[in-house]
Structure formats: C-alpha cells, structure tokens
Image: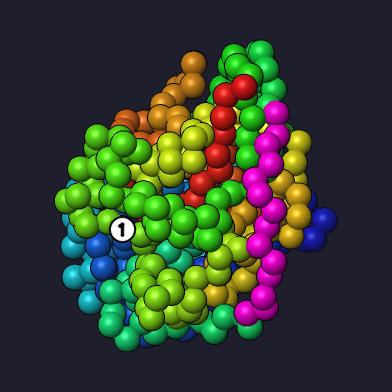
C-alpha cells in the first residue's frame, strides 16, 4: 500500500496543477446550457463541449491509453470525434462540422472528464518522468484551450441577435486617457532569443532552440494602441485608404466589408463593443482588441511606425514579470483594461509582430504524434507575443510564441508599435 512517505513531491505538485487546470475548464462552462455548448459559429471556432472533450481525449490517448496497463477507453467511438489534427491518430470528424455533434451531451462529456481525471490521478504517482512530462504538456495544452473556449464562446454569442451576456461585468469606473505613447529604446546587436534545452521550466518546442539574432537600432512603444486612438484611425479614413494596406489586407477589407475591429458597432454616434459581459460602450482608454494582422499593419503604417519583430519584442520583455498584468484567474467576464502605469508587456491583448511563424535554427519536432503539436503549422501565419486577458495566469513567458493567420481576429489581439532609430 502506498503511503504519504512514498509520494514523490514532484508528482504531488503535478497532481495539484492537473486538478486546478481541469477544474477551471469546468468552471468556465458552468453558465452554459447544452445548446450553448454545442453551437459552432464559424470554422475557426469549436463548440465548448468539444474543447472539454478534446482536452480529455489528449490525456486519455497520450497518457492513459499509451502508458497505463489495462486502461480501457471511456468510449471507443469518441477518439474519432475529439481528435483535432493528429494524423498519426487516424481519421477524425471534420472540423467545420463539430457543431453538428448534438450527441454526446454536455453532461456525458463532463462525466467523461471526471472519469479521465480519476484514472490519471490514480496512475500519476507511478508514471515515469517522461510520461509525467506528457501530463505537464497536457496541462499547458488545456490552458490554451481555455483561452480558445472563451474566445469561441464570445464569437458564438456575438452572432445571436440577443447579444446575451455570459457573465456580468464589473461596474465601469471612468479612467483617464493614457499619456501619449512613449518609446523604449531596444537592445542593439546580437541577442539571445528563445529557450535553451534542457529548460528549468516548461516551454513548447517551438520556443527553441536558443539562438542568436542581430537587432538594429529601434524602439518599442511603452504601451499598446488604445480604442480611442483606433477610433481616430477609423475617422481619418484608415479603412478606406489603400495606401496603408498590404495587398492581401486590402483585398480582405474590400471582400469582407471590414470597417472596424470585430464586435464594434456604431450606435447613436458612438462606438460600442460586444463582450462576454454583453454590449457596452467602447472604453477609449482600454487597449484595442480583436484586430487582425492586416489591420495592425495598416494602423502602424498610418501612424508612421511599424510592427515589432518577435525578436525585438522578446528582448524588450525578457526580465519583466510574465505573471503581471490583466490575465485569466477565474471564470468571469474578461476584457482588456486600461494600463495602470508602466510598460506592461504581458496580459490584456496578444500583440501582433511582423514576424512570420517559422522554425528557429536547429528546430526538430518531437517523435510521435505529439510532434505534430506545433511544427507542422509553421506556414503562412504570424507570431503574437505577451498573452491576453483570456490567457490563464502563469501560462506565458517572454519566449512564448502564439500564431494565427493574418486575417484572424476573434482572439484578444492588439497592437504595440515599433520604429527604427
């Protein structure tokens, strides 16, 4: 019989982390009905209950099925439904049709989660270190899905004409507009970028290997662009002037009829936005969000600046507290908030960079199915840095690389300017 003295402290800490991550996901969906959790408003988004099931499938497949003798799948039909993109795991349900899965129900998926939780926690103390590393990867994977869960719920509810609030927001308190953008001179010359291996803390494979990049004289803005500044861009015809836009961006604006950030609407002469707390007036002092790379690049051109490279951003953010700022701590309405002073590089909004999402020199994907996690997406996407108000606190760091296609904007994405010196 196992005694408390036999329990590895590292296993105990990992068990606590696993339990906390899994509990937050359940808390996030607590306000949702089965219908709320089933709908899929666009191909890029997934139903809430699919997120809940997929993250459980990850633990069940890569830990319990592969490394726990005698484990039996909760339902042998479900891997086909809840595999996302792992070709090594075989055929899967088409992503654009996830919203057609009225069965299994939300209640059944929550039962699935509880079964996986119990099995993994029971097995965890006896898992070898390499498999415990997979559990840690699964926790970070689920945190990514917690952010996607929130942004997908927001999009699902935005297409309903009722524009219902999912959570009640905090009372609005008037905040002074921030001072004009100041500039932080960046490092010049060779700088070390990315994480080294082995790392003393968790990192994704795409954050390394650590390598040298050459930076030229430049400066980064000391804060992100605000809603008020973006409204000025709109009023000045920013969305109607092709001079500021990349060709693909201008074609996107014309084809899609884009004229403001996602979720903005002009009502009685003023701008409003839809959020997890319903439709409210746009806060001019808060960071602008839900803008695409195309929009970010056009704004930077209009402002006489540019987007930072991901290497300039990382060099400036290194040494700053990645757990500061406005990040996700609990299940509630989340939105960017006005900065309370100081150049915050983490939280509120993901910051578009001008860097393509490509492998670092010497990058090698891991062996097996988990090697499909990041590497195969290194094409046609751009890097974002810093985390957002929907990113679980403790999830990001200076080397963290998020990535999306240039037209996508349903995430909490914003803009920090840069300029050459």
Image-quadrant location for residue 120: bottom right
Q: Residue at x 45, y 80 (%)?
A: 278
In the figure, is residue 231 to the left or right of 121?
left
Q: Please tell me how crowded label 1 is: few (under 14), some (14-19), or many (20+) other residues with Cα within 10 Å.
A: some
As helix, strand or loop, the secondary structure at mark 1 comes to loop
Q: Is residue 337 visible?
A: yes
Residue 9, percent from left and from top: 77, 51
Q: Report the quarter where the C terminus lies.
A: top right
Instruction: Give yes or no for residue 174 being in the magenta stretch.
Output: yes
Q: Residue at x 55, y 56 (%)?
A: 226
Q: Is residue 338 above or below residue 68?
A: below
Q: Which residue is outermost to the right?
A: 5
Q: Is residue 227 above or below residue 49?
A: above
Bounds of the magenta segment: 172-185
Q: Report the quarter where the N terminus lies.
A: bottom right
In the figure, is residue 255 to the left or right of 117?
left
Residue 314, percent from left and from top: 62, 32
Instruction: Give yes or no for residue 293 being in the magenta stretch.
Output: no
Q: Residue at x 52, y 29 (%)?
A: 309
Instruction: Count all numbered tags in the image, as a single digit.
Output: 1
């Amino acid at each position: 019989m196992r005694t408390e003295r036999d329990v590895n402290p590292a296993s105990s800490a990992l068990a606590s982390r696993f339990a906390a991550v899994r509990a937050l996901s359940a808390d996030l969906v607590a306000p949702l009905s089965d219908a709320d959790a089933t709908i899929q408003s666009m191909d890029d988004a997934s139903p809430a209950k699919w997120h809940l099931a997929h993250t459980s499938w990850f633990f069940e497949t890569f830990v319990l099925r592969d490394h726990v003798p005698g484990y039996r799948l909760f339902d042998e039909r479900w891997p086909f439904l809840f595999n996302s993109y792992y070709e090594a795991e075989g055929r899967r349900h088409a992503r654009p049709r996830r919203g057609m899965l009225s069965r299994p129900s939300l209640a059944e998926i929550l039962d699935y989660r509880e079964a996986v939780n119990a099995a993994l926690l029971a097995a965890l103390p006896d898992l070898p270190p390499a498999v415990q590393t997979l559990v840690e990867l699964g926790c970070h994977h689920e945190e990514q899905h917690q952010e996607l869960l929130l942004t997908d719920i927001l999009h699902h509810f935005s297409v309903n004409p009722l524009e219902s609030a999912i959570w009640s927001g905090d009372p609005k308190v008037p905040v002074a507009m921030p001072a004009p953008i100041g500039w932080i001179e960046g490092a010049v010359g060779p700088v070390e970028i990315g994480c080294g291996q082995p790392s003393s803390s968790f990192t994704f494979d795409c954050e390394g290997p650590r390598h040298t990049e050459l930076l030229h004289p430049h400066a980064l803005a000391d804060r992100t662009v605000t809603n008020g500044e973006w409204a000025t861009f709109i009023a000045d015809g920013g969305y109607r002037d092709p001079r500021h836009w990349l060709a693909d961006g201008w074609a996107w604006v014309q084809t899609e009829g884009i004229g403001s950030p996602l979720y903005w609407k002009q009502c009685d002469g003023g701008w409003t936005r839809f959020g997890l707390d319903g439709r409210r007036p746009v806060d001019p002092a808060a960071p602008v969000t839900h803008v695409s790379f195309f929009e970010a690049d056009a704004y930077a051109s209009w402002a006489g600046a540019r987007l930072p490279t991901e290497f300039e951003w990382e060099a400036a953010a290194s040494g700053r507290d990645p757990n500061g700022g406005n990040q996700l701590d609990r299940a509630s309405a989340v939105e960017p908030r006005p900065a309370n002073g100081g150049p915050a590089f983490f939280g509120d909004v993901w910051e578009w960079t001008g860097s393509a999402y490509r492998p670092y020199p010497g990058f090698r994907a891991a062996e097996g199915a988990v090697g499909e996690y990041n590497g195969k997406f290194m094409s046609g996407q751009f890097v974002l840095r810093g985390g957002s108000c929907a990113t679980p606190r403790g999830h990001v760091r200076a080397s963290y690389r998020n990535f999306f296609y240039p037209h996508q904007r349903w995430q909490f994405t914003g803009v920090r300017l840069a300029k050459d010196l």
